Amino acid sequence: MGTVKVLIIDHYDSYTNNILQLLQGSQTGQDGSPYPEWSVAVIRFDQFDWDTFKTELLPSLDAIILSPGPGTPKRESDFGFNSRLIKEVDIPILGICLGHQGIGTSLGATIINTPNIKHGQTAEIHHKAIGVLRDLPQRFWGVRYNSLVLDIESLPPDLEATAWTYDPEDSSRKVLMGLQHRRRPIFGTQWHPESVCSEHGAKILSNFRDIVLSYWATSRPANQWTSRSILPNATLPSHILNADVLLDEAHHSFESTTLRGVSVDGQNTPYYVASASLGKGPKPELVFQTLTRGSSADGEAWLDSAKVRDSHSRNSYLASAAFSLSYSIELGTVSVHQGGKITKSERLKGTYWHWLDHLQHELVLKNTQAILPESLNQDTEVGQPLLQVGLIGYFGYELKWESLPGHRYPDAEVERHDRPDSQLIFADRVLRLDNYTGEWTLFGLIRRGEQDPIGQAIEATSAVGLDEDEFADLVSRFRDAFDGLPSPPYVQPHPLPEFVALDNQDSYTSSIVQAKKAISEGETYELTLTTKFFAKSPDADPFALYLDLRGRNPAPYSAFLHFPAHDTTILSSSPERFISIDRNGVAEMKPIKGTLAVSPDPEEDLRRRNKLATDVKELAENLMIVDLIRSDLHNVSPSSSIKVPKLLHVETYQTVHQLVTTIQSQVAPTVGGVKVLERCFPPGSMTGAPKLRSVQILEQLEQQRRRGVYSGSLGYVCVSGTVDQSVVIRTIVKTGDELELGAGGAITWLTDEEVVETSLELKDARLALDHEQKHYTALSA
Ligand SMILES: C=C(O[C@@H]1C=C(C(=O)O)C=C[C@H]1O)C(=O)O
Ligand SMILES: NC(=O)CC[C@H](N)C(=O)O
């Protein structure tokens, strides 16, 4: 018994990495020390040409797993050289979904549209208990993500049907769910054993391993009479490991139990963070407008957590900029603003993500002694990060062009505009309000001496951070202000203006029909289709509009952000966490999928809550994104650390009920917050699955329109390494006097009598902004 060297060939699917969770077994060697059962790498199907693959990779492999994927195995652009691999090479192969279908089509079976399309739904698997299905219970549940299927009647003599299901819609018809070759070690499962809701996935993979081991242990014609010994702790050669698409730190740390040190402990860093307690104070909306707003020419932010309901919205932060950054993909340029002027403009050679990761890691983290989390005066739960000082702002959706593997910045068609794809302030002064206790704390970034490496790097005109005296002055100024805030008038809420829909009912319906067509062809399993609404508001103070929004729809990720450099103001009432990283490096993502409006009638409301918790369509929508996010987290976390502590819970906000799942993982110790954002960006709940193909289809369906800030993420990256970012939905972006609001919803095969329900979902999103007063033009208007 030894370590099997297996290569997973990925077809740009969003579930592939989850297979790693089924390969977690370990054995004990003769000397008593444990070793992993598998040595594994993941490559993309188009990463190597056939000749290179055959000569340079294949000889080092014991087995191959062919991943699920969009499209059809009949198309080379979806399945690459894998048909040749299946036909010509004697090596154990396990195919999942697309991989399974490809085994069939390569060896002569016919692929057809499945009689009942299922994505994110469980099927009862019946099987012969042979091959990889050995020793499994007679019936078990497997999750399906397929529009296509192999015709069970068309299997050639070499292929045996090993598993099948009966759709509830037609219980007399067998639908093929599994196959194996009669002579060669080739197996396929139509369902996804790696889904969080599938049973016995690990057992299937362990059966596959036994088969691989016995295949190589025996000499037979199929392996050209060459048995090979598989050694404990064997590993794939470095040229294959280096081709792995996952971050090395995340993937190949066999088991990472080391917690990340929070920032630097040393006493000699140029900066440190100081804090001062300010006691109880006035309401945050008053503090923001009297002390924070306008306090810096480069912008300010209020991460509001307007809805105090759980640990995730315990704190509010009011922050002022020491300088701001903006980035445009089109220009490839980062600009730094300080004192209202550009201090530096840099054309990047690499991506913005890379540049920012460097800034955060090399300039900020390494030079700053953050406050130790134990001294922050607040007990936190797992997954609850705290901000001291640091970067605050947004990452627009189009940054996907720099983050999503296989996605390229298009040279034609895409809508051009001069709005930045990301804007961030670097906040060196932050007021924190603990909403539980009402206590305020001031955090400041303090320069220990003359050194100011961050200022130097951005060619600052005035130093970044404060000296000790300045901080002491600030503390006494704030204390005085808390004792007697300036008297009214304060800014009063101003009702939101009327928004007009970009799409009308017909154009939106036509996009839904096209989305469903793409789903029926197996191109995607779920698409988050979106549209926009616009309004003009030349006179209203955006802060007054924000106060109205916050009163109407308090949400855990409510926020008000102002970036003077590009005259951008963001008014957010997002309920959705994209990703956070707490002080111990625990990442948490909380995708929302499934939305129903709250009803004023308690009976009806209960009925809606129950519907959300039990509805096949809503559960499937959510599950598809849960599996996608588990797969995303594999990019930055050891597989074994990825957990789903809360699956498919109903959470109720002011105007909507939502179906929410919590996913956590341990970020690999050397992977920084910006890298984590990059590798999980854009948020899966805004794309659908699989991510890459869905994003490409959505570009077409949305007429190459930019989503902009909407659909991206918003929040902070702290000098201590913690991160908290929301998904930008239910958010108004004001540029000049134009207000823009994006809204959308997930389209799946079950988006029923399509139009009605989806328009409703859209309306819900708008209702969230305007429940009582119906300011919005109806979509059909
Ligand atoms: C696209 C939006 O929301 C997304 C889609 C949801 C859904 O389909 O139920 C729910 C939350 C978001 O992930 C939006 O609100 O604009
Ligand atoms: N999940 C998958 O691999 C799907 C395979 C194929 N695109 C289908 O829809 O049937």
Image: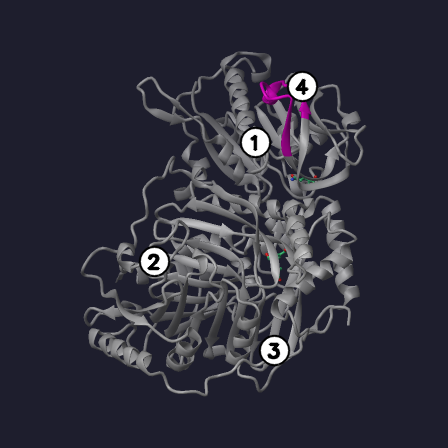
Viewer-nearest of discs 1 and 3 = 3
Q: Quadrant of the C terminus?
A: bottom right
The residue wearing badge 4 is 128
Residue placed at 37% from the left, 56% from the top? 722
First in sequence: mark 1 vs mark 2: 1
Q: CA distance from mark 2 to mark 4?
A: 54 Å
The residue wearing badge 1 is 65
The residue wearing badge 3 is 496
What colouring method underlies this structural image? one colour
First in sequence: mark 4 vs mark 1: 1
First in sequence: mark 1 vs mark 3: 1
Is residue 654 among the parts visible in the rendering?
Answer: yes
Instruction: Give the residue type at disc 4.
Output: Lys
Image coordinates of residue 266 in percent, x first then y, are 20, 56
Q: Secondary structure at mark 1?
A: strand
In the rendered image, the vertical position of residue 39 relative to residue 622, given as above or below: above
Image coordinates of residue 434 in percent, x first then y, are 37, 64
Q: Which residues, given as a range, are shown in magenta?
A: 126-142
Q: Secondary structure at mark 2?
A: helix
Q: Quadrant of the N terminus?
A: top left
Q: Which mark is residue 516?
A: none
